Amino acid sequence: MTPDDLVLTPIGLRFQGRLYPCSIGKGGLNGQKREGDGATPKGVHKIVGMLYRPDRLACPVSWAVPIGPGDLWSDDPAAGDYNTMVRAPYPHSHEMLRRADSLYDLVILTNWNWPHAVAGRGSAIFIHQWRRPGYPTEGCIGLRRADLHAIAPMIRQRTRLIVA
């Protein structure tokens, strides 16, 4: 582990010497993640990207990708582009990235089941804004808005999310 790693602990997410309160998946932690189980997968996950809403915030890092009105995330294990960013119209199951709420205004992407997704292992694990303290995610890591925005510029492409 290095100070640049995001490390999930029983009391929060540790990063660069600070501890940030966070939420995890409603299915708890799981070493055998499956699509729809709501679990946060155990393991060491590389940070592979960052998405942001340019109509709501400035670009947090030079390598962040803006989220546009037609941007979606495929969560259909039967689709050929499962667990990737896709564009509307899209005929398979998906999640809208450009949401009315602020949960996905800033999204840090991990390499969970990516780039070569295995059907049924579960789609993307994001680090994103939480709904409220203590409210679980569908498997992602949720942070307070201010904490997420403070962490994002310090993320490097060598940063990892460690879930023990």
Image (cartoon, rainbow, N blue to C red):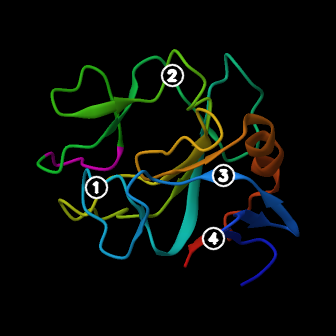
Q: Amino acid at mark 3?
A: Cys
Q: CA distance from mark 2 to mark 3?
A: 27 Å
The relative height of residue 47 versus residue 147 in the rendered view (above or below) is below
- Where, quadrant-wise, is the C terminus in this rendering? bottom right
Side (left or right) of 124 relative to 149: left
Residue on which the image places disc 1: 37
Q: Mark 4 and mark 2 in contact? Answer it, CB < 8 Å.
A: no
The relative height of residue 6 versus residue 71 in the rendered view (above or below) is below
Side (left or right) of 27 relative to 54: left
Q: Residues within 10 Å of mark 1 (few under 14, many from 20)?
A: some
Residue on which the image places disc 2: 68
Q: CA distance from mark 1 to mark 4?
A: 23 Å
On residue 160, which mark appears? 4
Q: Residue at x 73, y 53 (%)?
A: 21
Q: Which circle's residue, 3 or 1, is located before the other in the chain?
A: 3
The relative height of residue 88 versus residue 138 in the rendered view (above or below) is above
